[in-house]
Image (tube, rainbow, N blue to C red):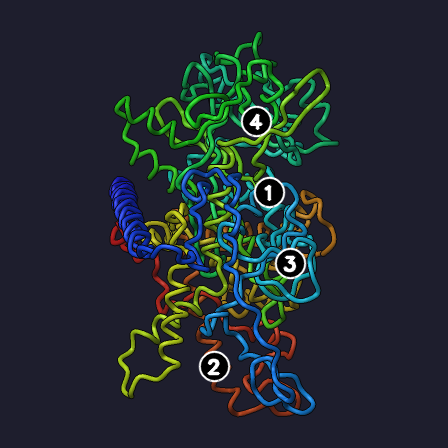
Amino acid sequence: MQRGSSERELAAGWEAEEAAAAKAQAAAKQVRADAGAAGEPERKAGEEPSKDPAPVQPRAADEGDARSLPRPPPALPLSEPKPAPAHGLCRHGKPRCKGRSCKRSSGRGPDGHRSQRPVTVDSSKARTSLDALKISIRQLKWKEIPFGRRLPCDIYWHGVSFHDNDIFSGQVNKFPGMTEMVRKITLSRAVRIMQNLFPEEYNFYPRSWILPDEFQLFVAQVQMVKDGDPSWKPTFIVKPDGGCQGDGIYLIKDPNDIRLAGTLQSRPAVVQEYICKPLLIDKLKFDIRLYVLLKSLDPLEIYIAKDGLSRFCTEPYQEPSPKNLHHIFMHLTNYSLNIHSGNFVHSDSTSTGSKRTFSSILCRLSSKGVDIKKVWSDIISLVIKTVIALTPELKVFYQSDIPAGRPGPTCFQILGFDILLMKNLKPVLLEVNANPSMRIEHEQELSPGVFENVPSLVDEEVKVAVIRDTLRLMDPLKKKREKQSQQLEKPLATKEDPSDSELASAADVNTNAEAHLPSICLKQVFPKYAKQFNYLRLVDRMANLFIRFLGIKGTMKLGPTGFRTFIRNCKLSSSSLSMAAVDILYIDITRRWNSMTLDQRDSGMCLQAFVEAFFYLAQKKFKMLPLHEQVASLIDLCEYHLSLLDEKRLVCGHGGTSGGRPACGGTPQEAALSAQPAEGNPLPCVDSAHKLSHSRHALS
């Protein structure tokens, strides 16, 4: 695929969508203005105002400020008391029914039209995102359940983890396994697999080493580069695996630094090449926090917020030297660190201070002639590729916690991508946060030791919009409203029925439910740009094979029987690869990976160990091809043989079984392992090397 053409397509798509959104928002404002003018007829003298005035337009919806108080409801006009119902009649004037009370028609509002119930959101576990969530629910006119309840809710909002609560239905804003997947070591391993397959496409992530496992490799490789280029004087940044908010991060010049070697065993870490030439604004280093919504895992759906936050250092930047390595306010952009600097500037403006909106940075760069569309297309590409690297193992976690066929919620999640722009405007991924801060206030020191929480307008403008529009995209009643609208569009074959007018009225109410809200701030980037990136999803297809042969629902590791069944069903054994060699391969790789992972709950082969074994098999079978084509060819071969096996089992299934054994042969244990249908799309051809190359050019 030609990379330049895909970037142009991304930029053109972004520009077209921005123009369309602006045009739609302008049209919506005009409609609201016209509706407001037409909806207030002149009142006669002495006439009472309407009982249902138009709702007050909250300033928060357009400006991100949701603290404006709602207008008190107008006083109801006085009316004469209604006479008591006659004896034997209910309060509606109808004959009383023996043994039951008289009730109005269910599901109808005061005007007699059918009304929908509000969406319910359980906020009992929301924690630090509670304030922004409350504002969002209020703007959407949904119903908050602040203390939880026994009855199921539509949406559950967790503050930390998928396992904050036991949920069997609805939607929850966390994926199982996401917290583990974006830890620094796990993320580095996932990206490294993709760098091995597609080194050019994944050069946005700094070269990394995992410590202590790769400490000797780190020292040897750095020394080798120095021997080849004596002028190379690198700086490295050490990030503890479990650290957050800048905790434990420091810079080094020498790999043999005492602090580095002394803390490895107790605190595993990732060490990366430090970006020495970042883009500066006002002589300060800054990074970008972008909010990404993973709406669905299968099928994959990704949205990116059109605005984010820019967090600034509080000390003018200088390239690293032995004298300034310890200056954290110069080198580390973490908000939680710089807020303690005496130079930190709190500002109510989005374009000044130590925390600003990303859009204000783009406006400033645009005024200097920077191609903003190119910057955005590079960022979109980085986000999609990173999510593609994370999804394979997320699928394994998902099937473990929510096995197919068992009750469970659907999941979505807001991720925080921390991105650094280099001096040449190339974006670099720093890390991904599973629980980005959604606080809309900050601590301000009134006097020594005395702090007060003060609202942050910059945070509120960005974060409330992200949460509110995430809820809008996940609205569980949206499909029902759309179905009602589609029914109205169908031509009526019979005379107009009173229920039709009720349906029309209800649909009008639902259509205008979001009329007071601004356009959605989240832009879909996948599957919208799937054609440019689907060729990268090789590990995703490997994960489908891995899950198929796990055998027992809920497990995350492949046993030796499952691995042998995979080899046999995919026809991978041969004279050069005996089943004894397969067993040795399984034992060697599994033992090494189990020694590197902290989770020892299950024994067996994890997904990353399976990927390593798969690479070995692909290189052994297709020796003359590049690695990504070797892997693609082996995946196609496996999917082809499994599709034939599925067809055979389907035919044999109609014939039943005899003697307790599968009708098509094979042991019952192997049949159980391979009976699940292959996920993904089995392809009828094996020669995928030319096909992959051809498809990449075709997609561009």
User: Neighbour class for label 3 at 10 Å: few (<14), some, many (≥20)?
Assistant: many
Mark 1 highlights which residue?
131
Q: Earlier in the sequence, mark 2 or mark 4?
A: 4
The picture places residue 84, in percent across and down from the top left corner, at: 62, 78
Cβ atoms at labels 3 and 2 below 8 Å apart: no
* Mark in the foreground, 2 or 4: 4
Mark 2 highlights which residue?
648
The picture places residue 197, in percent across and down from the top left corner, at: 43, 45
Q: Earlier in the sequence, mark 1 or mark 3?
A: 1
* Mark in the foreground, 3 or 2: 3
Left or right for 295, reference 35: right
* Mark in the foreground, 1 or 2: 1
Please tell me whether mark 2 sits on a helix, a strand or a loop. helix
* Mark in the foreground, 1 or 3: 1
Cβ atoms at labels 1 and 2 below 8 Å apart: no
- The residue lying toward the viewer, choosing from 547 and 319, is 319
Q: Earlier in the sequence, mark 3 or mark 2?
A: 3
Mark 3 highlights which residue?
556
Please tell me whether mark 4 sits on a helix, a strand or a loop. helix
* Mark in the foreground, 3 or 4: 4
Please tell me whether mark 3 sits on a helix, a strand or a loop. loop
Give amino acid for label 1.
Answer: Asp
Mark 4 highlights which residue?
335
- Label 1 and label 3: CA atoms lie apart by 37 Å
Give amino acid for label 3.
Answer: Met
Residue at the image position 49 percent from the left and 12 percent from the top: 316
- The residue lying toward the viewer, choosing from 423 and 698, is 423
Please tell me whether mark 1 sits on a helix, a strand or a loop. helix
* Mark in the foreground, 1 or 4: 1
161 to 382, vertically: above or below: below
